[in-house]
Amino acid sequence: MDVMIQAISIVVQPTNLLVMVLGVIFGIIIGAIPGLTSTMGVALMVPVTFSMEPASGLILLAAVYCASVYGGSISAILLNTPGTPAGAATVIDGHEMTKKGMSGLALGMSAIASGFGGIVSAIILMTLAPFLAEQALRFGPPEYFAVAVFGLTIISSLAGKNPFKGLMVGALGLILASVGMDPVKGFSRFTFDNPNLLDGFSLIPVLIGLFSTSQAFILMRNKIQEEQVIAEIKGRVIPPLPELIRLLPNLIRSSLIGTGIGIIPGVGTDPAAFIAYNEAVRWSKHPEKFGTGILDGVAAPESSNNGVTGGSLVPLLTLGIPGNSVSAVFIGGLLIHGLKPGPLLFQKSGDIVYALFLSLFLINILFTVIGLSGAKLFTKVLDIHPIVLGTLILLLSSVGSYSINNNLFDIWVMLGFGVLGYFLRILKAPLAPIVLSIILGPMAEQSFGQALLMSSGSYSIFFTRPISLVFLIIAVITFVAPFIRKKVATAAH
Amino acid sequence: MNKANRVFAVILIFVSIITFFLSSGYPAEVSAWPRFFAGVLIILSVGMIIDSFISPKREAEIDVYGILKTEGKFAGIILLVTIVYLLLMKYIGFLIMTPFYIGFILKFLSYGNWRKILTLSVVIPFVIIVVFQVFLTVPLPQGILTDFINQFRIGGAL
């Protein structure tokens, strides 16, 4: 109870309320601009949080994360182009509503559904995470190794069309993660006597390079801006109350789907939105109306993709497993404040964790209100030229990377990973596996070494301890499942 | 895409071989981890090369070389300019170098007229300095202007 009171006092501080508002506005802008992703927005904000209080920093990142997922629907509805992948399913009915002159209503529905999904996921996060964290307190090195292996097997579901490519990028990430002192013996590896590399590649410049710098190169590559037709916002914005009441079962179902999918590492916001949309069609009395521009088709994907936000924080905060690329970047935000995700986080910094939970409620309400009232203003950012955006992102990437340690070497790391990310994007290789590997690789190696020390070199320790065994079995299932699913789908076709 | 995938696989095999080579002098326990994954990377890379012949239509055909030849050229020049900018920034400073850097990129990418370019070249660094150096107290490298900026800091502005 004390922790909760402390958390409330943190959240209502004027600075944190201001941080929330600024984060929400920045997040909506990032989400609304096609080509800029939530991951990139959060990665750019991590260095900004460095000089803040830990709670304020995390609140800012959470605000950017939640608001950017919602922001993706603005361009999905008005431009027929989702601002973020999470908004892809919203295009189907959202843009049809725009064609019918009901863009205002579509934007209003998207803001309300997103806020609703986010609040449902925050409730589940707040209920589930402390319980899971308590269970995770029993974990020793073998369990942590099994958890890290489980986290790494998510790579198979992030691998995209060519599974080899995703797995190769993951293996490359694990090699890159071994740069620096080895976590058991303290022997320096691949450092070339450079003291900057003793602790390995600094995580934030790596994340900024992969997600932001590479995106800047892509934006500047697209020299000629395509003629965009931004539809005008027409009609009423807030849906009538009877309509909202009618949509309530759809909203609850979709939010729960989104939160559930968010908790499962590796699935992400875009599949969550499509699954919720499909379920909405399946449960509807008029499935034939979907795709013609109805509120139900906007409510389902939007409540689901924002449901993912709270859900994805469950494995991140309790076990230290980033379920998607945004939560991987979120880890960076925790680490620069000396907060190590995992069960001890709840014990050592309970006030900060609960402040984050509570702030999620306010953030979701805030972006709903700002979204409902300021949709017209946010459409203005769709006019910003990609060249200006690219230049600005490149500059912010450099300054952001430098600001973590005031070290120019970090800018070179950012640039190197930016070039790597650029080539990987051109090759259609996923970026998330490399980040997962860099975060989970050292954790896996350290706990593996410690577990073997405990067992005097016997590998049986991983299979004789029940929790470790369960995680290893889940890891095998997680790794194999996407391949089996693909085989089944191919056979069905 | 298949040809590009094969080149990608060969590059990663090369990275794996370098990993093996560089870790050859390390104690066995220290080198085991990177060597294991270097081995995995070789197997996966060889697997992808074989797969590109068995399932050539796994991925949609993309002219990777075409992209690199045309659009990649722009990215290459921007990268080069960024490297020069970062190298000089240490000595000349953020405040002086950044307007030139932004101006060059915007002009090179044929963005707008001179008035727009000049405005952005001045406004963007100014905003970044205010946000990072003033509000977030990040000491941006100011090179030859370090003393000048410090004077302002004592005066209270920066």
Image: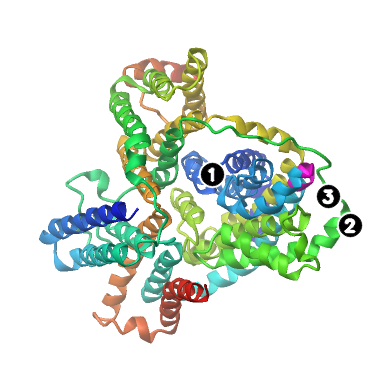
Is residue A103 rendered magenta in the image?
yes
Q: Which residue is drawn at 32% across and 57% down?
A: A173
Q: Which residue is drawn at 72% across and 34% down?
A: A376
Q: What stretch is highlighted in magenta?
A: A100-107
Q: Where is residue A177 in the image (x, y as percent from the top left)?
A: 30, 56
**Chain of the residue under the numbered disc 1 shown in the image:** A
- For label 3, the SS is loop
User: CB atoms at circles 3 and 1 under 8 Å apart?
Assistant: no
B90 shown above or below A431:
above
Residue at horizontal 46%, vertical 41%? A47
Provide the secondary structure element on which disc 1 rests.
loop
Query: What's the magenta bit mostly, secondary-structure-wise?
Result: helix
At label 1, the amino acid type is Glu
Nearer to us in this view, B70 or A132 = B70
**What colour-coding does the image apply?**
rainbow
Q: Earlier in the sequence, mark 3 or mark 1?
A: 1
The residue labelled by disc 2 is A242
Q: Can residue A327 be seen in this view?
A: yes
Give amino acid for label 2. Pro
With respect to residue B79, does A35 lie above or below? below
